[in-house]
Image: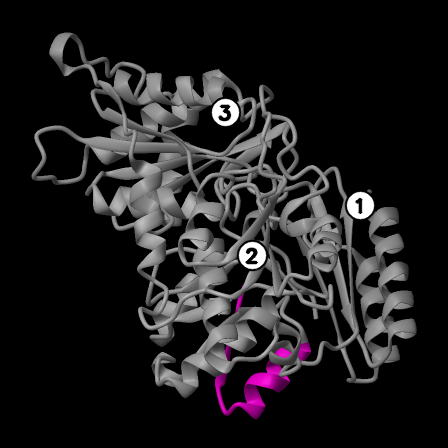
Amino acid sequence: MKNHDQASSIPNKMRMFGTDGVRGVANIEPMTAETVLEIGRATAYVCKQHKTQAKRHRIVIGKDTRLSGYMLENALTAGICSMGVDVFLLGPIPTPGIAFITHSMRADAGMVISASHNPYQDNGIKIFSRDGYKLPDEEEDEIEELVTSGRIQAIRPTAEAVGKAHRIDDAIGRYIVFCKNTFPADLSLEGLKIVLDCGNGATYKVAPTIFAEFGAEVTAIHNDPDGMNINDQCGSQHTQDLVEKVLETGADVGLAFDGDGDRLIAVDEKGHALTGDHIIAICARMYKEKWLLKNNKVVTTTMSNFGLRHCLKKLDIEHVTSNVGDRYVLEALKKHGAILGGEPSGHILFMNHHTTGDGIIAALQLLAAIKNYQQPLSSLAAIMQLAPQKLISVDVPHKPPVEDIPELNKAIKEAETHLNRQGRVLIRYSGTQPMCRVMVEGPDEELTNRLAIDLADTVKKCIG
């Protein structure tokens, strides 16, 4: 099975916006102050086309803890204000918190300055619409066209028509209350020992407060950001420190968030890291038993493990597959009238609570399952058995369509022959980084690993 992002299949014209906004190395195109200023101007122009009952159009801006966030925040603010739109600055706050504040304030848009799980030298821009959902592709394309064409250069409001910038000091408090309201009112976290890995990112203030206020005994690690340590061998992609701290403290659970707080990876009391697939399986079971699983459907992407599919089948839950990327999970959730979906990376959407993936809300639902079943996390996770899987990321200088590379297609067919219908091959480009993902699932570890390594070598040879 082959797959690649739509944005990556056009060899001669790459979209500025990938599967999760604009992203790149800070201070290098497109993440320069000059281009970000133009993105702000273009976004403001699009927002001014919206009908609003407010006297002035408004855009909310939040960020994670990267050093370059200061530079890009000022550039973005300048661009928006130069088009006569007011800015409300939230400071460091998780991405889903910005979506919530945007919707609750009835702002025209919410803009996030973050590169999510990427290293600190990267940064990016994500945009939410006024209803708290990721901006549709059509509006992203319009913003990109305005930036590249220069059509808005002649539009220059003056005098009182220039926008103003305001700072919202209680944004974190509002978001904390919002998250807490997603936890069952009849439960508390009394008696639970929890270790939090905040990834030196946007959850560093919010997460410890929320779980402690529910009565848990909280130990927080990697919650001292300095602008350069975000995601640095910590957070949802690097759980080694979390595993060690869980075992050292005898904690019931470890929770790891990524830099902007929209992903969750959990560690059980035995020190085993669970994927987003495990979390989805546990919550799907609980939601079904409590009659909360709307239309009895769960949405996951093509990257989800075969084990989750078997688990959902045993639970008599219908499984829907979407393209890779949380925006495509969201599209499928809306289409099928479902409320639970996500990715093995820990991007999990609970549409009964929020319009976007939220690591803290996902954590609260998982902890609700632990309290509801009165079982350790390792026992709950046993509901799903992972099929052997190997994922290798290969750096690539460009992204030609996979189907146009004969040698790679031959290697894929040979691998599928070796698997003999007892697994699958998935090769796709990252929508946010210059990488090609090679994923193989098979009947045993040895064959799975060997085929994945061979295919990764072929990708390096053909594209690298």
Q: Are marks 1 and 3 in contact (CB under 8 Å)?
A: no
Which numbered disc, 3 or 2, marks the residue closer to the eye?
Answer: 2
User: Which residue corresponds to mark 3?
Assistant: 69
Tag 1–tag 2 contact (CB < 8 Å) = no
| Spatial CA span between label 1 and label 3 | 33 Å
Is residue 358 something that shows in the picture? no
Residue drawn where x is 42% and y is 38% of the image: 93
Foreground pick, 30 / 398: 30
Rendered-image quadrant of the N terminus: bottom right
Between label 1 and label 3, give the one nearer the viewer. Answer: 3
Looking at the rendered image, the disc whose residue lies closer to the viewer, 1 or 2, is 2
- Can residue 50 be seen here? The reply is yes
Callout 1: SS: loop
Residue 327, percent from left and from top: 45, 56
The residue lying at 79 percent from left, 74 percent from top is 388
From the viewer's perspective, is residue 241 above or below residue 64? below
Q: Going by the image, does 54 lie left or right of 8?
A: left
The type of residue carrying mark 1 is: Ile
Say which amino acid is labelled 2.
Leu
Percent position of residue 213, x then y = 40, 53
Secondary structure beneath disc 3? helix
Question: Which residue, given by chain and number where applicable, does mark 2 sit on?
Answer: 264
Q: Residue at x 47, y 48 (%)?
A: 207
| Mark 3 and mark 2: Cα distance apart in space | 23 Å
* Residues packed near mark 1 inside 10 Å, few (<14), some (14 to 19) or many (20 plus): some
Looking at the picture, does residue 257 appear above or below residue 340?
above
Looking at the image, the residue that sits furthest to the front is 191
Look at the image and give the residue range highlighted in magenta. 306-324
Write down the residue under mark 1.
463
Quarter of the view holding residue 381: bottom right
Q: Is residue 442 above or below residue 395?
A: below
